[in-house]
Amino acid sequence: MDANTRETLTVPPVASRDPAIGRALWRLEDGRVRTLETLDGLSDDLVDRHPADESSIGTILYHIALIEADWLHTEVLEQELPADMASLFPLVHRDAAGNLTAATGYTLAQHLDRLGAVRARLLDVYQAMDGVEFRRLRSLPDYDVTPEWVLHHLTQHEAEHRGQIGALRSALERL
């Protein structure tokens, strides 16, 4: 950007039935753009590599997609993962020690396709939702939650892991 160009920073809502939903979706999508920028140019040989006692970039991407799919279906839609979504996640989420199961053998493109499929489903659900449903409390066995809070949580979750991916990538590229 040159000295004569003025940047305008706004939150243009994603198309939806309610402007508040559209703005929340924009924040989620802006985070995804940043995640994709963090991954831009990453070679497939780095996807499965990791320092001792840390997850790989691929495992983190698998986890981000799985958590998004789970929160969408369990909390927002109050249903089990449908077969088409469940087929994207053949691995158990965590091992017996509570660590993320290593999601190895996938290319970066495969991880991005999985993330994209889950996000497309989430956008379809939220764009069709009205404001009342967006704020309707869901009562689960351990807590109550609204779809509005779920979007907040997913935005934060991906941002935290994006930082982890960026640090991991930097470390791996120095090796």
Image (cartoon, rainbow, N blue to C red):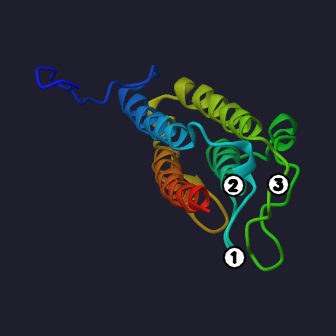
Asked if residue 14 is positioned above or below residue 146 in the image, the reply reads: above
Where is residue 80? Give x, y as percent. 79, 47
Q: Which residue appears farthest toward the left when viewing the image? A: 4
Task: Tell me where residue 144 sits by quadrant.
Answer: bottom right
Q: Which of disc 2 and disc 1 is earlier in sequence?
A: 1
Asked if residue 135 is positioned above or below residue 166 in the image, the reply reads: above
Q: Which residue is mark 1?
A: 53
Report the residue at 57% width, 42% height from top: 39
Label 3 is placed on what type of residue? Answer: Thr
Task: Tell me where residue 57 sits by quadrant.
Answer: bottom right
**Callout 3 touching callout 1 (CB < 8 Å):** no
Of 24 and 55, nearer the camera is 55
Report the residue at 11% width, 20% height from top: 4
- Alpha carbon distance from label 2 to label 3: 12 Å
Label 1 is placed on what type of residue? Answer: Asp
In-image side of 159 versus 85 (left or right): left
Q: Which residue appears farthest toward the bottom when viewing the image? A: 97
Asked if residue 133 is positioned above or below residue 173 in the image, the reply reads: above
Of 101 and 164, nearer the camera is 164
Q: Which of disc 1 and disc 3 is earlier in sequence?
A: 1
For label 3, the SS is loop
Quadrant in which the N terminus is drawn: top left
Report the residue at 67% width, 31% height from top: 121
For label 1, the SS is loop
Of 40 and 90, nearer the camera is 40
Q: Which mark is residue 30?
A: none
- Alpha carbon distance from label 3 to label 1: 15 Å
Label 2 is placed on what type of residue? Answer: His
Q: Which mark is residue 63?
A: 2
